[in-house]
Image (tube, rainbow, N blue to C red):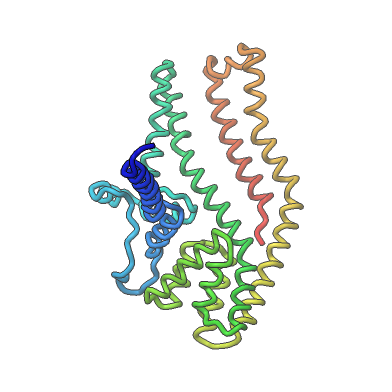
Amino acid sequence: MGSPLYYLFAVLLFLAVVLLIEGSYVWWNDSKGPEAKRIERRLRIMSAGMHEEGTRLSILKQRMLAESPWLQRVLLQLPRIHQLDRLLEQSGQPWSAAQFVGLTLATAILPIVIGSYFSWPVYVSFIVAAAAAMMPLLLVIASKNRRLVQIDQQLPDALDLLGRALRAGHAFPGALKMVAEEMPEPIAGEFGITFDEVNYGIAMKDALLNLASRVPSRDLSYFVIAVVIQRETGGNLAELLDKIAAMIRARHKLLGQVRVLSAEGKLSAWILCVLPFVLALVILLINPGFVEVLWTDPVGPMLIAGAAVLMVIGIFWSRKVIRIRV
């Protein structure tokens, strides 16, 4: 048997290792964990889309475009950088403007490097690079549209919860907090930001206008306008919220019927848009000489340009026909 001092040393070493692991976990959870990231994101976008008539409130933290101050100054010189930053916030992506610009440049440079390695023609490399550079933007736009659809679907239930909270005797800010705590993301985060803004001293009207600015949804705009008018003129807000929720549900039901009726037209439009490229690829694989005349004959590029113009016109025309606004 070892001495008692040896066992004491082993126990103390074990406790030290356990405390080190626990301390590292607590530090990571407080600084890098999901709750810390959620709080940091809410603080960073608190001032996005401010509708204060004067200067911004000093208690709000400005959303940074980049971590580095010099990169922040460079990005501020770019045109429409704030619109890009707003788009990133509306998409729900965790990227900053600097990260998005860096990703766009990387996706644009990569095809040029690959093209130079495989000796692609210069114009082909630049065309592929331009198409690749658009991919991050298309991803952000798709994320924004998907997030807006989720918010629109959750909004009627959120309004019902607001109405029940008001009938139970809660104040409107407290009802906003209940929505932030009870509803799922992404609508919970948006209402939570509005509640935080009110707690930081922003007027309710300005906080609601900020919400409408962050979430460019027509249904949410109805809610914001109705609440702003009700707070100026008075009335039963709970009953008003119930009517807005019923109207939004009826509108969503009508939109669903429209989507069903226009589904065949959308499918036909997609087939007509994709079919020429698929047929050209198949013919190129089966009989390359049959297609090579398009770029070997002097008339070929003119035919390709004319076909591209006609296809663009057809795409816009098909989109106009099958897109029904409700």
The residue under the point 55% across, 62% down is 187
Q: Is 94 above or below relative to 314?
A: below
Q: How many marks?
A: 0
Q: Give the left or right position of residue 52, taking residue 195 as reference.
A: left
Q: Is 319 above or below relative to 51?
A: above
The residue under the point 73% across, 50% down is 262
Residue 82 on image: x %, y %: 37, 55
Q: Give the left or right position of residue 193, taking residue 256 as reference.
A: left
**Which quadrant would residue 289 be assigned to in this image?**
top right
Residue 272 on image: x %, y %: 68, 36
The single residue placed furthest to the front in the displayed view is 1
Note whether residue 97 is visible: no
Q: Is 133 above or below relative to 78?
A: above
**Which quadrant would residue 47 be assigned to in this image?**
bottom left
Residue 297 on image: x %, y %: 54, 15
- State which quarter of the image contains the N terminus: top left
The single residue placed furthest to the bottom in the displayed view is 234
- State which quarter of the image contains the C terminus: bottom right
**Nearer-the-camera pick, 88 or 189:** 189
The residue under the point 52% across, 73% down is 176
Q: Is 236 above or below relative to 109?
A: below
Residue 145 on image: x %, y %: 56, 52
Note whether residue 103 is visible: yes
